[in-house]
Image (cartoon, rainbow, N blue to C red):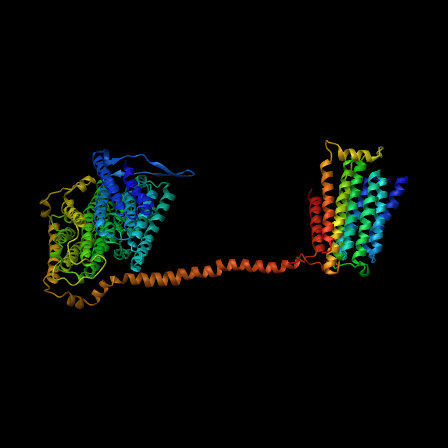
Amino acid sequence: MIFAIILLPLFSFLVISFVLRPFFNNRPQLSAYTTICAIVGSLILSIWALISVSGAENHVLTSTSYQWLAIGDTVINIGITMDSLAAIMVVTVSTISLLVQIYSIGYMKGDGGFARYFAFMSLFTASMLGLVLADNLLFLFLFWEGVGLCSYLLIGFWFHKPEAARAAMKAFVVTRLGDFGFLVAIIFLYVKTGTFDIGELHELALAGVLGGSTLTLAAIGIFSGAVGKSGQFPLHTWLPDAMEGPTPVSALIHAATMVTAGVYLVARMFPMIASSETAITVVAIIGGFTAIFAATMGLVATDIKRVLAYSTISQLGYMMLGLGAVGIGYASGHLDGHHALTLGVAVAIFHLFTHAFFKSLLFLGSGSTSHATGTFDMRKMGGLRKVQPWTYVTFVIGSLSLAGIWPLAGFWSKEGILHEAHAYTPVLFWLAIITVFMTAFYMFRVVFLTFHGEYRGGKEGSHSHGLHESPKIIIIPLVILAIFAVIAGWLPVGDFLGADVNFSFFGALTSWLAWVSLSLGIAGILLAYIIYGRKLLSAKSIGQSLGPVYTLLIRKYFFDELYERFFVMRFLVDGIFAAFQWVDTYIVDGSVNGIATITVAGGKVMRKLETGQLQVYGLAIFIGILAIVAFLLIFS
Amino acid sequence: MAVGLEHFLILSAVLFAIGLYGVLAKRNALVILMSIEIMLTAVNITMVAFSRYSHVISGQVFVIFIMVVAAAEAAVGLALIIAIYRSRKTVDAEKFDLMKW
Amino acid sequence: MGLDIAFWVLAVVSVGAALAVVLMRDIFRAALFLVLCFFTVAGIYITLSADFLAGAQVLIYVGAIGVLIIFAIMLTRESRRGSPSGRLRLPALLIGLLFLVTMVFVVVSTDWHVIAELPTEPTTTAIAQALFSGEDGFVLAFEIAAALLLAAIIGAIVLVREK
């Protein structure tokens, strides 16, 4: 049954690719319905699994695994882990995916690649669900790469646009860097322990059999995969560019199927990674740094989707920080074993869960504004509050939730992370608390620029039909997501994941930490209101007065330039590629040409022997006979 | 010393070696053909000698077949030499370079 | 004893004739020495009690092949150029001698199991029986030999025919 969660969308992909697209291409709606039916099926099964898990012993459903490969003594199984972590993830993924698909019917209407779009979306969802459910690292890696492939296909969905093609390539190559470390870690672990099974690896790590530098290297390798997928520093550059894909794809990538895979991986491998203090410290530092680093870039971006992308990177940094902080607490002995391991997973996955709803809401909302104006550039929007009331309201709810305003979903999950960060990583906590302010500011900068003030023109684009509210099929998912963006924080996700969370609706307001973050969030909103709502302060003059800092932010800390100019041009092109070229020219070609030259030269010599004269041949025959006879006489 | 099998075999070997020398060393295609006939005859002597000294008649039957093949070979070989002579006005084996590319 | 003397005489003559074939400068005389060589070989056959083969040797080699070669010499008019040696004379000599030495060594060093008595029966009947008897016979080979001769005749005619 649990396999069906993966197989349904996969089956939908196959049906669309091999039946609907070739034979029913004149009725593209069919593929949308196929996808939605499959995902509804997955969602129902996921909820069933969630309920079963909550009733099961230890919150784990056991299921049989099937043999996939047997190479000598090595047997690799296809197996499923259905525990509380996986159950939460599959429900989140299938819910978000379903709403995004419904939204896509409206958003992608009339696109030439409608069927192709839904085929890829099905495969994308199937890969992510498989990734979540896989019980061994090799099987997980298979889906991991499947997710990477689908993101490539969907970011480059409008491949006729050169930017989209380039962005897809960039996403693929940059994540590949992290995946390389992940793959090396998998192989390394297998060589050291002889197993791919995640549960066994955890037992070995917790028992101390797997430890020392082996564990640290493997954990960092796995984390590097997560860094690539989750767009953490320093592999964050692909995520803002990934906005070239259709907006629902961005929503799916950011909320459910792609970037969360990294956080999920760290959560899944948490007992192992947390067993190495070095590795978990790296996780915490990268997470904390990424959170503030990405937020600063979000302050100045003018493309609405790019702001949201930086926000995603920043929020994923939070999740990594949550895992890392608890992990440090565990590794340094402040927290006892089982409690710490579940707590870390709980705070991070809780934030992942709430973030999935409000971030997909924000993306879909931005798509809705673009549906009206034909652009994503906030400088050309404005005043949409009046024409798109539904979009406006839902977008504000999403922004408030992201800014962490009580009592919306983002507040609860962010509080959890800040609390743990404060307890175990004080320095990173201060970075995170500054980030709260920035988050509120840049989100409401978006709100004021997009929905308030006067309309600044927009752009005649493919989706522009004049200013109007989006159709119902777009609005309904927004409303559903907005409801979740409010209530998702009230759901007992943390308890379900095994951590003891004292949920108290008003009690949360008694801690000083909540007041600090809340007041910082409100301060951010107010500042945005002053600058962009009331225009009491000129954004331009602030930008000019900050001069170099502003340039640094708007140019994204020159990371693209650094990677492009230094790594790609100097290191790769001038260094490695030049070396390859040298090897290719002089060694590969050289050996081939050398063999050819030797053959030709040899032929020139040998042809002298071929005189064409019978008697020479006869002589050779008899020399041969004599040689054979001599051989027989001597050696017999 | 009474004449025995060895004598015939050595006689055969001598004739064969002479024929071999002729085949390899002479330039005239006709002489080469004659030398080949000497070699075949030498082989025949061996066959007959073994037949005589083992009282097995098959050796002589083989000699008959070798004679048949030798006759056919002589006929075709001479026809070839005449044909080549017609086109090239020579039977010098060193000037036959048709097999050279 | 008489056979021994006959062998030595015939052997010396045949070797001498063969040498004359390969050494003579006059091609026509070489052909005649070849005929002499064939005759002596027929004599050798007689010393080996192969009466039928001796007859066949005279008929086929002396009668057919010898005459054919002489005809060919006359047709190609090569006799005036003689029978010169080619560039490979020395290598050929070396190989020939090496070959001879090897053969003699093998012949001498091998312990032959021989039946010294002369066969008493004439061979003609025996050969006929071997050729034509149903079992362990050479009927098929005989027929193929006939076909080979026919092919050789036709081939020779086709090759030599004036265009």
Residue nearest the viewer, comparing B71 with A356:
B71
Q: How many marks?
A: 0
Image x and y of residue A455, in percent: 14, 62
Give residue A207's quadrant in the image: top left
Inspect this view and state whether residue C104 appears.
no
Residue under the point 11% across and 43% down: A504
Give residue A569's quadrant in the image: bottom left
For the C terminus of chain A, the image quarter is top right
Give residue A344's quadrant in the image: top left
Residue nearest the viewer, comparing A499 with A554:
A554
For the N terminus of chain A, the image quarter is top left
Residue under the point 83% across and 58% down: C25
Image x and y of residue C27, in percent: 82, 56
Q: Residue furthest right?
A: C2
Q: Residue furthest top?
A: C135
Left or right: where A390 falls relative to A7: left
Left or right: where A316 falls relative to C145: left
Left or right: where A176 falls relative to A308: right
Residue under the point 71% across and 49% down: A626
Residue nearest the viewer, comparing A578 with C22:
C22
Inspect this view and state whether residue A449 appears.
yes
Vertical placement of C98 versus A299: above or below?
above
Image x and y of residue B66, in percent: 76, 43
